[in-house]
Amino acid sequence: MTPRFMQEINSYPIFTEDWGADEELLLITGLASHGIGNWKKIAEHVGTRTKEDVEKHYNEVYIESPNWPLPAMDLEFDTDPEEFHERKRRRISAMNATAPPPPKVAPTSAPGIHEIATFLPGRLEFEHELDNDAEDLVKDLEFGVCLAYGGDQIPEDEEDADVKARIKWKEEHQLAVGNGVSGRGKKSPGKGFLKGPKTINGKTNGYHGNGNSHIIKQEPKVADIANGTTSQDEEAEELTQPPPYETEESLKFKLTLMEMYMQRIEKRLEGKAFIFNRGLLEYKKMQAAEKKRPREERDIIHRLRPFAKLQTAEDYEVFAADILYEAILRKRILELQTYRRLGLMTVADIDKYEADLAKRAQAKANPPRDYHNYDRSHARSVSRHSTGPDPRRMTEHESIEREGTPKLPVSAPPVRRLPAPLNLANSPSLHLLTPGEQTLCSQLRILPKPYLVIKETLVREYARRGGKLRRREARDLVKIDVNKTSRIWDFLVQAGFLKINNDPVTAAPASSSLADAK
């Protein structure tokens, strides 16, 4: 007994070999429900296809059909039903096995969440668009019946509201002509309403075409008034006015308005695309990058901004980088010309000049703390210890006696007071120091972490040299004040980190320190 296969209803190909009639029907109903372009919803409506398959099939079968808007209806396919259903089952199984993509987080357009207050990221729009009044050109624009551009060849839909209004107007107009109220002896339009003479119906572009296309009222009969009824309803007293015809001048004017509107919209889209492509919405990131640049570079970048609209993003970045490099070269050339005028011919001369210039600037900006006090005290001491009374008032005997009196020495400048100890209560890495090291760092005003780096440097160098490390060499290793280096050296020797005194070979640091003092 031969097995029977149950075939699904309409599950056979009609337009392509891999799409069944049931899928074609679901595609058409999905397009009608969700609209063309909403391929994700349409694919969910079909149920057996992805959104890419649905879009590709619609474009190939319907849009690119030689019988558009209808597909090719004369195709026949010799496909085995069992093989067709097997392909369909495999396709559905593959779709079910694929994990759905994670849902995207809905963008939030509330003010204050994004950096630009008037930007709506969910719609990629702004509250106030570029050329925000562009829609005022076309907001009140309406088109009537257009017979140009092949409009007279388009078949009419009897269910269309405008067509129904035109037919009703024609019947009412014929009824009015039959009753003798057509006015001025004009005839009603005959057959070929769209293709006949261009009788202007109703109000077209600000004027009336035919004379008596106004409201026509019929007088009620006396019997109807006595019975409390009228022969016609109040709603039917006014003739139905169909859409007017578009003349050549009116159509040209309206198309000009549409062209002006599209030009302004294109300019708006170009501005928005420029903002999105160049990342101008990341205001904080741009502001941080601007702060890193010197003031001269910021001024140059600001002057180059108009050229950004004339170039792509990559070309503009290369262009701006080249301009900045040129500015750096020009500045360096001016510096070298200045050095040449000063007589500096070598790099060593320039380095020495820059170092001396920096020292003079630092000394001028940071004078010694007791400099002014020393001058004042020195002036007071000199005035206080005068050489004696005025010689013009002294007698000869007094002058002889006072000649042998020795002069008092000028007072020496006051000793510079040491700065106050540094408070290390909240300093990091303080727990890594011993109490003696904490006191030393407080007196020398050195933070714990730099002290640990200095200590590690000296101890490592001491171990590397096998204990043969001198005080002078320690000063060269640590680039700080020599007095602070000496005190740290002495502390490390006393604490036992550096055993200098116990080594007879390296017992010369004391003599070297004395030589340094001399």
Image: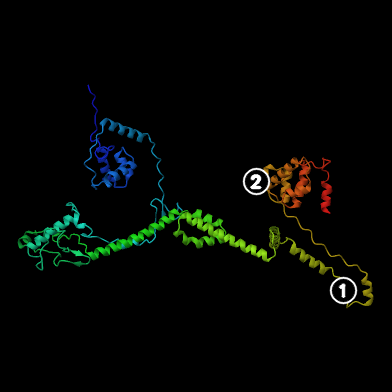
Residue 274, position in %: x, y?
43, 56
Going 33% across and 40% down the picture, which residue do you hit?
A: 50
Going 75% across and 49% down the picture, which residue do you hit?
A: 475
Residue 407, position in %: x, y?
88, 67
Kindly state the secondary structure of the residue where label 1 is placed.
loop
Q: Is residue 427 left or right of residue 142?
A: right
- In the image, what residue type sits under mark 2? Pro
Which quadrant holds residue 465?
Answer: top right
Q: How dense is the environment of label 2, judged by Cα within 10 Å: few (below 14), some, or many (20 and up)?
A: few
Instruction: Mark 1 and mark 2 in contact? Answer it, CB < 8 Å.
Output: no
Considering depth in this image, is 2 or 508 the residue closer to the camera?
2
Res 283 seen here: yes
Residue at mark 1 to residue at mark 2: CA–CA distance: 64 Å
Q: Is residue 502 above or below residue 420?
A: above
Which label belongs to residue 389? 1
Q: Which residue is outermost to the left?
A: 223
Considering depth in this image, is 74 or 20 the residue closer to the camera?
74
Q: What sort of colour scheme is used for the picture? A: rainbow
Considering depth in this image, is 347 or 504 the residue closer to the camera?
347
Q: Is residue 502 left or right of residue 198?
A: right
- In the image, what residue type sits under mark 1? Pro
Q: Which residue is mark 2?
A: 428
Residue 408, position in %: x, y?
87, 66
Going 7% across and 65% down the picture, which residue do you hit?
A: 180
Screen quadrant of the N terminus = top left
Res 117 seen here: no
Residue 499, position in %: x, y?
79, 41
Kindly state the secondary structure of the residue where label 2 is placed.
loop
Q: Is residue 424 left or right of residue 168?
A: right
Which quadrant holds residue 152?
Answer: bottom left
